[in-house]
């Protein structure tokens, strides 16, 4: 397995709150538990900010992950290429995706809220990595017939992170705004993927 394994344990999510907050995988259920935490005053006002982030990321119904959608759209836009004629349009488009990722017009009011946002980004990074390591798009070639070794999968994921958080934004003069998000994505990759630091070094120095 590419990801480092950790055995899940059955724990009351409200115990030692908010330690187990992100162990609640279903967004709708996570919102319900968060609402209980707010009603009990377990971690106010941070829980109010968590609710704000949760609703921004998943919407009121908790069905779609706006972070994931923004990530995929940035990847698709970058793959389409940039020209003199579409650069301004792509800048505007990227800024909207940055808003969806809480990189623009969503500044935390203090260091504590900033820490909550960084943790939300970290959760997204873990969700993305789990998805990538189990996705046929990443783990096979030739329409799913020939498997790729784990090292190749790891490098592909690293290349995507580098492209979405640096290469493409840099071409549109928006790389600086991506810096805090990029740091979280890279650190999570290096921590979650076995030999992740080595793969990352190979990719960014190739």
Image: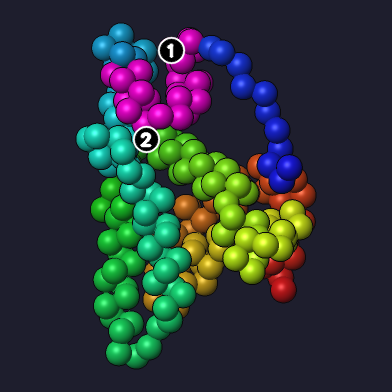
The answer to whether residue 158 is visible is no
The answer to whether residue 171 is visible is yes
Residue 10 placement (x, y as % from top left): 56, 13
Q: Rounded to the nearest whole Å, what is the CA distance between mark 2 and mark 1?
A: 20 Å
Figure check: 122 above or below 9: below
Q: Nearer the viewer, residue 184 or 115?
A: 184
Q: What residue lies at 33% left-to-right and 48% top-to-bottom? A: 66
Residue 14 image label: 1
Q: Quadrant of residue 103?
A: bottom left
140 displayed left or right of 15: right
Mark 1 Cα-neighbour bin, 10 Å: few <14, some 14–19, many ≥20: some
Q: What residue lies at 53% left-to-right and 12% top-to-bottom? A: 11
Residue 46 placement (x, y as % from top left): 34, 26
Q: Nearer the viewer, residue 78 or 173?
A: 78
Label 1 element class: loop
75 displayed left or right of 157: left
Image quadrant containing the N terminus: top right
Residue 179 placement (x, y as % from top left): 48, 58
Label 2 element class: helix
Q: Residue furthest bottom?
A: 84
Q: Which residue is disc 2 drawn over?
A: 113
Q: Give the magenta range.
A: 12-35
Q: How many marks?
A: 2
Mark 2 Cα-neighbour bin, 10 Å: few <14, some 14–19, many ≥20: some
Q: What residue lies at 33% left-to-right and 60% top-to-bottom? A: 97
- Tell me if label 2 and label 1 are in contact, CB under 8 Å: no
Point out the frontmost of discs 2 and 1: 1
Earlier in the chain: of badge 2 and badge 1, it is: 1
Q: What residue lies at 42% left-to-right and 59% top-to-bottom? A: 72
Residue 175 placement (x, y as % from top left): 45, 67
Asked whether 24 falls inside the magenta stretch, the response is yes
């Amino acid at each position: 397995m590419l990801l480092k394994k950790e055995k899940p344990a059955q724990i009351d999510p409200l115990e030692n709150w908010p330690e187990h907050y992100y162990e609640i995988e279903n967004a709708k259920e996570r919102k319900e538990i968060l609402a209980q935490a707010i009603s009990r005053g377990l971690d106010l006002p941070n829980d109010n900010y968590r609710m704000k982030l949760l609703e921004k990321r998943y919407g009121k119904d908790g069905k779609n992950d706006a972070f994931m959608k923004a990530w995929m759209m940035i990847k698709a836009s970058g793959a389409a290429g940039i020209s003199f004629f579409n650069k301004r349009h792509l800048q505007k488009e990227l800024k909207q995706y940055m808003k969806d990722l809480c990189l623009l017009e969503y500044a935390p009011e203090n260091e504590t809220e900033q820490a909550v946002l960084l943790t939300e980004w970290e959760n997204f990074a873990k969700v993305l990595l789990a998805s990538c390591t189990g996705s046929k798009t990443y783990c096979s070639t030739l329409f799913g017939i020939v498997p790729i070794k784990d090292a190749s999968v790891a490098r592909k994921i690293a290349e995507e992170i580098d492209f979405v958080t640096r290469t493409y934004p840099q071409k549109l003069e928006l790389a600086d705004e991506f810096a805090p998000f990029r740091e979280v994505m890279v650190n999570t990759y290096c921590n979650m993927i076995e030999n992740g630091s080595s793969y990352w070094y190979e990719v960014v120095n190739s």
